[in-house]
Image: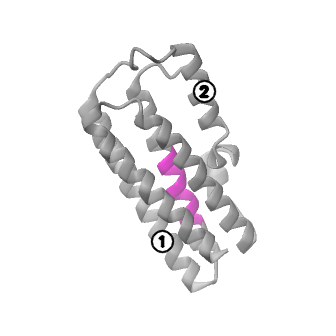
Amino acid sequence: MAGIFKATDILLAAQEVETRGEVFYNRLVETTTDEKLKDTYRFLAGEERKHRELFRKLYERLGQVELPAWAEEDEYASYLSFLIDSHTLFRLGDVDKIRAYAGTREEALETAMGFEKDTILFFTEMREFVPEGEKKYVQECIEEERSHLRLLASML
């Protein structure tokens, strides 16, 4: 993911995070036998889909917004690349590997919690790159990701 040069590139990365999250949660729906967990994973897959759509629309509205003047391009590109590359669902591999994920109930919940925590951090940083009038949408996603993390933690 190296070489993020526009704020909108960060929005593309956010869409990829949400796509991977949806694939991951759908995989958990397929593999778990616990009906309560299935319902939770279905809900979370829908949330990821909703967030991806929000970031797609935001991307379309923003066009090719430049990084803010305060951002050191090389430094921030490296930092944001690290956030993406170290993100739980990117460490699992490509989407096909995520579709093949198999873990215990606890491993799945812990992986999902890691995904939500990594996403909160990425979105918190991403919020700084969108225009002031658009920050509220990113903040809403951050709050929803926090509620997802609490939900998953309660099930662990």
Residue 112, placed above or below residue 124: below
- Residue type at the position of mark 2: Tyr
- Residue type at the position of mark 1: Arg
Percent across and percent down for residue 79 are: 60, 27
Residue 104, placed above or below residue 75: below
Q: Which residue is drawn at 56% across and 29% down?
A: 80
Alpha-carbon neighbours of circle 2 within 10 Å: few (<14), some, or many (≥20)?
some
Q: In this view, does 68 lie to the left or right of 63?
A: right
Label 2 residue SS = helix
Q: Looking at the image, tell me whether mark 2 or mark 1 is earlier in sequence order.
A: 1
User: The magenta stretch spans which residues?
Assistant: 17-27
| Numbered circle sitting on residue 42 | 1
Viewer-closest of 37 and 139: 139
| Numbered circle sitting on residue 121 | none
Q: Name the residue under label 2.
A: 79
Q: Is residue 7 left or right of residue 78?
A: left
Q: Residue at x 64, y 83 (%)?
A: 33
Between the C-alphas of marks 2 and 1, the distance is 32 Å
Q: How many labels does the image show?
A: 2
Q: Residue at x 61, y 36 (%)?
A: 83
Which corner quadrant holds the C terminus?
Answer: bottom right
Alpha-carbon neighbours of circle 1 within 10 Å: few (<14), some, or many (≥20)?
some
Can the viewer see residue 63?
Answer: yes
Residue 27, placed above or below residue 66: below
Q: In this view, does 51 lie to the left or right of 146?
A: left
Percent across and percent down for residue 89 are: 63, 49
